[in-house]
Image (tube, rainbow, N blue to C red):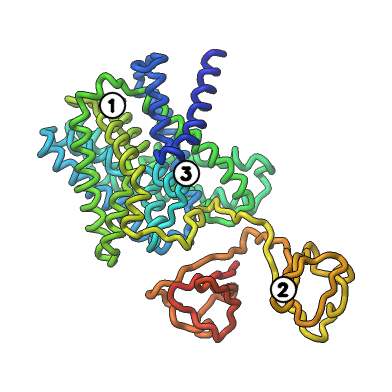
Amino acid sequence: MTITLLLVAIVILLCVMAEKFSGKFGMPALILFMFIGMLFGSDGIFKIPFDDYKQAENICSIALLFIMFYGGFNLKWKAAKSVAVKSILLSTIGVAVTAFVTALLVRLELGYTWIESFLVGAVLGSTDAASVFAILRLKKLNLKDGTASLLEMESGSNDPMAYMLTFIAIQIISAGKAENILLQIILQLVFGAAIGVALAVATVWLLLKTRLISEGLDTIFMVAMALICYGLSQLSGGNAYLSVYIMGIVIGNSPIKCKSTLIAFFDGVTTLAQILIFFLLGLLTFPHQMPEVFISAIIITVILTLIARPAAVFLLLKPFRCSSKQCLLVSWAGLRGASSSVFAIMAVAAGVVMPHNLFHIVFMVSLFSAAIQGTLLPRVAARLDMIDDSADVRKTFNDYQEDSSITLMRMFIPKGHNYENRLVREVSFPTGSLALMIKRNHETIITKGDTRILANDTIILSVPAYEPSDNEQLTETRIDGDHNWCNHSIAELSLAPDELIAMIMRGDETLIPDGKTVILENDIVVTYHE
């Protein structure tokens, strides 16, 4: 037992260090987690025998449920709602189109049976949220036209559709047919969504309206609720991954007081879950079997990357007048990873037998996708001129926090002000503030206690940043040409009673607006609301 614990600790430490090296090589860390697993596997140095797909399925399913939950919890709805329709289409119809186009071409090019081809397309239909999030955040890669939020929401929400298609394919292979497919799809969607929303509402109510959850136990309570959501959805025939994802979105965008604690906790949990999944994927592989599936994996990767994924993206985004550059970038960003491999494990654990090992095919496709598409994603975005240097991609996540807890305030001293001709130490500045400097004509004076304040001085104060309560928010909105505020004065807008436009950032200029201020295209409007 002691040796096993030491081995687990060593594996985790190696994976943590791999995260650091991945940044230097420009390679997603998850690939290195796979290689560490292969290093410990049957064909590796340590030769740990592990080929129990059923046990791997159980472990990966639990890990994936927490990844799905946190993907929803960390999605900032205010940033994503403008692209929600496009994201939902990509994560449902887009996954189906990708799966069926892939199945058709796999059937034609590789000669698999129709149902085997459909299974390959189903397990590879979704994109990998962990890989997409990791690259966007590591490279601080904010993208134009809301593309970052589009990718975040799509990659976080498309696993349920791929899971459903995989489930149907496994049923057809196992039983020779799938009865009442349409009914099963409807039940999975309806029960999955309903259970996710119901338990999310119950969770928020318990946290906000009762004192049943003791302080410090909110993380354990949330783990229990996520597990209950997953279990109830499974028992009722609903889509369990859809349930926990919707539950995460509702809770993560609710004004619960323990949000910062939950974010820190689940950030660690999901990181460990990702390490666990990718390490197990590597551990399950037998490198000596890779050559026999290498060509098939290359062909399937090309089909997915250059044909199936672009076909789905252009089909669904072009009606929204998305630019070809945006469509190309979204197509390229369709990385395959953990979820595809987990679905392949489910199929193998269910007894699906194919001419070539399905798991190894999907593993290699995921490896090629993460290594090639993931590594080149920043360059492709730059080549397509889709990088927005004026924004911060971290603000599209709920865990974003400003780097500084103080802010600066400018105070002009007119003639006759009660600060005039007084020393700094004699003045009662606002509580918690500190006079940093005085701007006098073209001179900057660093203030001390004996610095005298004169008329027409501008005093620069550092003041504590205001920490809003859970029901108060500051929101940044970039104004494009189609926004209904564009070219209108603030007085003309129909703002809610609890909403105020606090500031407008226009290029390098910051404006404190009044009713006459006209909002222009490319302005960033900061809105305060409860």
Which amino acid type corresponds to the residue marked 1 in the rendered image?
A: Val
Q: Amino acid at mark 2?
A: Glu
Against 262, residue 149 (above or below) is below
Residue 247 visible in the current orientation: no
In primary-sequence order, the first of circles 3 and 2 is 3
Task: From the image, tell me which residue sits under label 1.
Answer: 348
Q: The N terminus is located in which quarter?
A: top right
Task: Give x and y (percent) for residue 358.
Answer: 24, 29
Q: As drawn, is 234 to the left or to the right of 431?
A: left
Q: Residues within 10 Å of mark 3 (few under 14, many from 20)?
A: many
Name the residue tied to disc 2: 443
- Label count reads 3
Q: Out of 273 and 324, give the one closest to the viewer.
A: 324
* Disc 3: which residue: 69
Measured from the top left, where is residue 400 in percent x and y? 55, 53
Observer-side mark, 3 or 2, equals 2
Give SS at disc 3: helix
Mark 2 nearby-residue class (10 Å; few <14, some 14–19, many ≥20) = few
- On the image, which quarter does residue 467 sit in? bottom right
Please indicate whether residue 469 sits to the left or right of residue 268 in the image. Answer: right
Q: Are marks 1 and 2 in contact (CB under 8 Å)?
A: no
Q: Earlier in the sequence, mark 1 or mark 3?
A: 3
Residue at the image position 55 percent from the left and 69 percent from the top? 526
